[in-house]
Image: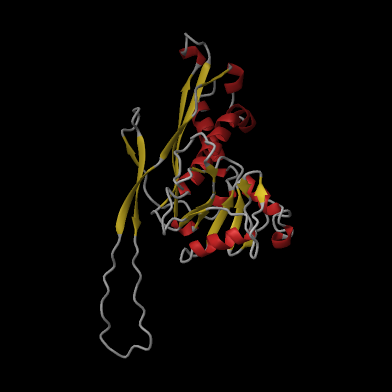
Amino acid sequence: MPQNFPEAWLNRVIQNLNNAEQASFLDGIAELNAEIHVVNGGSATEQNIIYVPVTDFEVDILVNNNTYPIAFQEYTDDTVQIKLDKYQTKVVTLRDDDTLGASYDKIDTATKSMTRGINVEKYQRAIHSIGPLTHTVKTPVIEATGLMAGSTDPLMDGTRPRLVYDDIVRAKEACKGFGPCRLVLNETHWNDLLLDRKNFGNQLVDYAAGKPAPRIAGFEIHQYEGEMPIYTSAKAKKPYGSIKDATDKVASVIFNKEGIAKKTGITKQYFVKAENNPTRQSNDLAYRHYYIVTPYRAEKVAAII
């Protein structure tokens, strides 16, 4: 077996994790320029932690000033500690033939399900993390009503009010002061809007990868087909991975991308050669990957349920 097997495979897997097609709602969110601190490295309690400076500081602007010297204004900020989420694959057994050589095709074939599984999980957790914890003025959770302007009869899909253009306008009003925002639609809400050709024409029908995201009611629109956050009837977000109850609703998520932190941490490879594995007599391979997407603060995020 080539001596460069572990390094070549690890480097290729890291490249695939970093360059894989992301969920579009993360496009343009820059990686944080923050040093990764490894805590308890090599143990079961290992953590990747970063420290991020945040501030609400806004300088006062003087217009047509004629008073000198100009007054001082002291800059203030704070530091937020962020712990990256840890993603681990189960141990995969590989034949000797699968691990001979360092061909990229061979590596990609053997690790495809691992890298895809990590990416699916981390993007689903990303959109869940962005969704507000509960309804507040700074983190509104708006209910779809199915009511168009001037109508008292809501558009329904069974017992569920459909999401309509007027609901998006109401959400925009609730997000006043947030700045430019993205609206990430779940599959059901996306399909609701597809039915409203009067307001949306072909904006959603013609939307494809590589084209600019459509803008509706001031929101940059994205679709995500993965698992979206689930909210209770009290407008509280359920923990990640929760089962949807009958009274729960699946959300679409709104956020200002400037308020979102994103950081890719360390990726580790765990490998045991078959010749060193007498009990299983197989090559055992697993990966650990650290990654986080989260709002800096509980503000400028919202949900439509």
Residue 67 point in image, percent of width and height: 28, 89
Residue drawn at x 49%, y 31% is 7
Measuring from the top left, give residue 111's x and y in whole percent: 58, 29
Toward the front, the furthest residue is: 152
Question: Which part of the image, by quadrant, shows the N terminus?
Answer: top right
Classify 108 as above or below 140.
above
Q: Relative to 177, is 71 on the left or the right?
A: left
Where does the image place residue 147, in percent across and percent down from the top left? Answer: 62, 58
Q: Residue at x 47, y 23 (%)?
A: 271
Asked if 266 appears above or below 52 in the picture, the reply is: above
Specify the farthest residue to the top. Answer: 279
Instruction: State the residue in front, 61 or 179.
Output: 179
Which coloring applies here? secondary structure
Query: Where is residue 12 drawn, in percent x and y?
Result: 55, 35
Q: Work out whether 112 lies above or below 196.
A: above
92 lies above or below 183: above
Nearest the camera: 42 or 102?
42
Number of callouts: 0
Give the image quarter of residue 106: top right
- Residue found 34% across the figure and 73% down from its top: 59
Q: Is there any visible trace of residue 174 in the rendered image? A: yes
**Is residue 213 visible in this depiction of the protein?**
no
